[in-house]
Image (cartoon, rainbow, N blue to C red):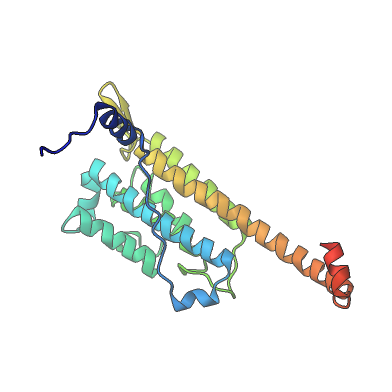
């Protein structure tokens, strides 16, 4: 007996289902580590923000090197990939970048946009931004229960990233050409991937600033609620507690 062929209606339904199925991005959470026991929920959120922002900076540095290959060659690295690793390792380990001396954080950022600077501008920009982020965390990449964040400093960091993005798009050399090529808009097409990735960094920092401020505010409110509520509810009979609920 010959095999049955699927009906035309069934084939149509399958094609529609495949064409209309949304492409979903997988969410891959980190594996549990013992260190998380010493982290509050706020610490954990801050640590995820740091991880994702450093990943974004590494991606941006690679993209800048691709558009400005002369920059990574100034670093003396053997390849573009090696130049990216050197900068990001210096950020993560809290080590100085040789070309910048002891300059770091906001002190390193002006080098990237100084027309007279002869070093790796892309590396200086990303190293400055990366060390600015770790500076917010007290020079570390992870926060624990004994650590906290200053909401205003986080908001200032978000503003600094916005300033850096503006300078990246507008600063030119004596010849009128951009000091660093990034976004591109032309007849052949547009490349706004730099703007999008920087936007992710800015958005995470803005949210983290609000969470840091809210964490402080809620901590005080919860403390006051505990002082006021505990004496009232501690000796109520069970039926009275049910009535309150």
Instruction: Name the side, left or right, on which 124 lies relative to 3.
Output: right
Query: Relative to 193, is 78 above or below?
Result: below
The image quadrant of residue 100 is bottom left
Nearer to me, 35 or 106: 35
Question: Which quadrant would the C terminus be assigned to in this image?
Answer: bottom right
Q: Looking at the image, can residue 49 be seen?
A: yes
Q: Identify which residue is drawn at 58% across, 74% down.
A: 145
Q: Looking at the image, can residue 176 be seen?
A: no
The image quadrant of residue 232 is bottom right
Residue 166 x %, y %: 45, 38
Residue 1 x %, y %: 10, 39
Residue 214 x %, y %: 67, 57
Query: Relative to 14, is 130 above or below?
Result: below
Nearer to me, 183 or 17: 17
Nearer to me, 72 or 6: 6
Q: Residue furthest front?
A: 1
Nearer to me, 118 or 131: 131
Residue 123 x %, y %: 32, 53
Instruction: Name the side, left or right, on which 162 lies relative to 112.
Output: right
The image quadrant of residue 14 is top left
Q: Identify which residue is drawn at 62% across, 53% down.
A: 210
Instruction: Name the side, left or right, on which 79 lies relative to 110.
Output: left
Instruction: Name the side, left or right, on which 122 lies relative to 77.
Output: right
Q: Identify which residue is drawn at 32% across, 50% down.
A: 59
Query: Relative to 192, is 102 above or below?
Result: below
Q: How many marks?
A: 0
Q: Residue furthest top?
A: 187
């Amino acid at each position: 007996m010959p095999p049955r062929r699927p009906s035309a209606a069934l084939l149509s339904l399958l094609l529609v289902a495949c064409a209309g199925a949304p492409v979903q991005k997988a969410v891959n959470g980190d594996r549990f580590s013992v260190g998380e026991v010493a982290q509050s929920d706020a610490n954990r959120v801050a640590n995820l923000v740091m991880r994702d922002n450093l990943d974004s900076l590494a991606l941006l540095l690679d993209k800048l090197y691709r558009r400005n290959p002369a920059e990574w060659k100034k670093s003396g690295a053997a390849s573009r990939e090696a130049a990216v690793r050197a900068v990001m390792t210096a950020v993560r380990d809290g080590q100085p970048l040789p070309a910048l001396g002891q300059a770091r954080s906001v002190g390193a950022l002006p080098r990237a946009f100084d027309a007279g600077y002869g070093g790796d501008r892309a590396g200086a920009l990303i190293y400055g931004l990366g060390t600015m982020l770790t500076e917010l965390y007290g020079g570390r990449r992870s926060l624990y229960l004994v650590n906290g964040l200053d909401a205003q400093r986080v908001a200032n960091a978000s503003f600094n990233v916005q300033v850096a993005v503006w300078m990246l798009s507008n600063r030119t050399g004596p010849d009128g050409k951009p000091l660093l090529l990034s976004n591109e808009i032309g007849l052949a097409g547009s490349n706004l991937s730099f703007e999008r990735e920087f936007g992710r960094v800015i958005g995470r920092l803005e949210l983290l600033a609000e969470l840091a401020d809210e964490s402080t505010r809620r901590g005080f409110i919860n403390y006051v609620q505990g002082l006021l509520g505990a004496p009232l509810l501690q000796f109520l009979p069970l039926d009275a507690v049910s009535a309150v609920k």
